[in-house]
Image: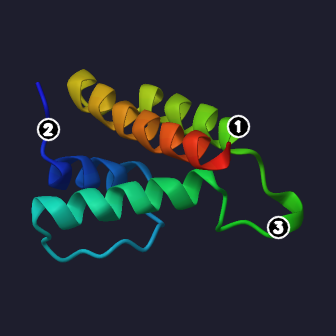
């Protein structure tokens, strides 16, 4: 089952409540863009000082671990991990 990106964005907000992500209601296209951009920033560790940044692979590992350990329904976890995979693949493609 596929989930709307607005639902995945809400799930992301539940996992990372301290991140300032807009609370306004967005359409699917804007929800997808915001979710992917937020995940991209997280994987690139852009919110950390440059001297202590970790690689996207390490950040991906920690993110998947956090999603898997969450109390979200399993199908939402899978959909959110798939979003992380999509962004990670984009980062790998752009990096090479």
Contact between labelled residues 2 and 3, with CB atoms less than 8 Å apart: no
Q: Is residue 2 left or right of residue 12?
A: left
Cα distance between the residues tagged 1 and 3 = 15 Å
Image vertical order of residue 4 relative to residue 6, above or below: above
- Disc 3 packing (10 Å; few <14; some 14–19; many ≥20): few
Image vertical order of residue 56 relative to residue 78, above or below: below
Q: Mark 3 sits on what residue?
A: 50
Cα distance between the residues tagged 3 and 2 = 34 Å
- Disc 2 packing (10 Å; few <14; some 14–19; many ≥20): few
**Mark before the other along the chain sequence, 3 or 2:** 2
**Mark before the other along the chain sequence, 1 or 2:** 2
The residue shown at (25%, 56%) is: 32
Q: Mark 2 sits on what residue?
A: 3
Q: Tell me the quadrant of the picture where the N terminus can be found.
A: top left
Q: In this orientation, which residue lies closer to the viewer: 70 or 35?
A: 35
Residue 58 is tagged as: 1
The residue shown at (51%, 55%) is: 40
Q: Is residue 93 left or right of residue 15?
A: right
Residue 92 is tagged as: none
Residue 34 at x, y percent in the picture: 33, 65
Cα distance between the residues tagged 1 and 2 = 26 Å
Contact between labelled residues 3 and 1, with CB atoms less than 8 Å apart: no
**Mark before the other along the chain sequence, 1 or 3:** 3
Residue 71 at x, y percent in the picture: 33, 32
Residue 72 at x, y percent in the picture: 29, 33
Q: Quadrant of residue 83?
A: top left
């Amino acid at each position: 089952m596929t989930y709307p990106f607005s639902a995945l964005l809400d799930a992301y907000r539940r996992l990372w409540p301290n991140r300032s992500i807009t609370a306004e209601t967005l359409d699917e296209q804007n929800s997808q863009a915001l979710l992917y951009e937020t995940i991209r920033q997280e994987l690139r560790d852009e919110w950390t000082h440059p001297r202590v940044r970790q690689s996207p692979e390490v950040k991906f590992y920690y993110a998947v671990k956090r999603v898997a350990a969450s109390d979200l329904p399993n199908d939402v976890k899978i959909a959110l991990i798939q979003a992380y995979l999509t962004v990670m693949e984009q980062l790998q493609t752009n990096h090479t």
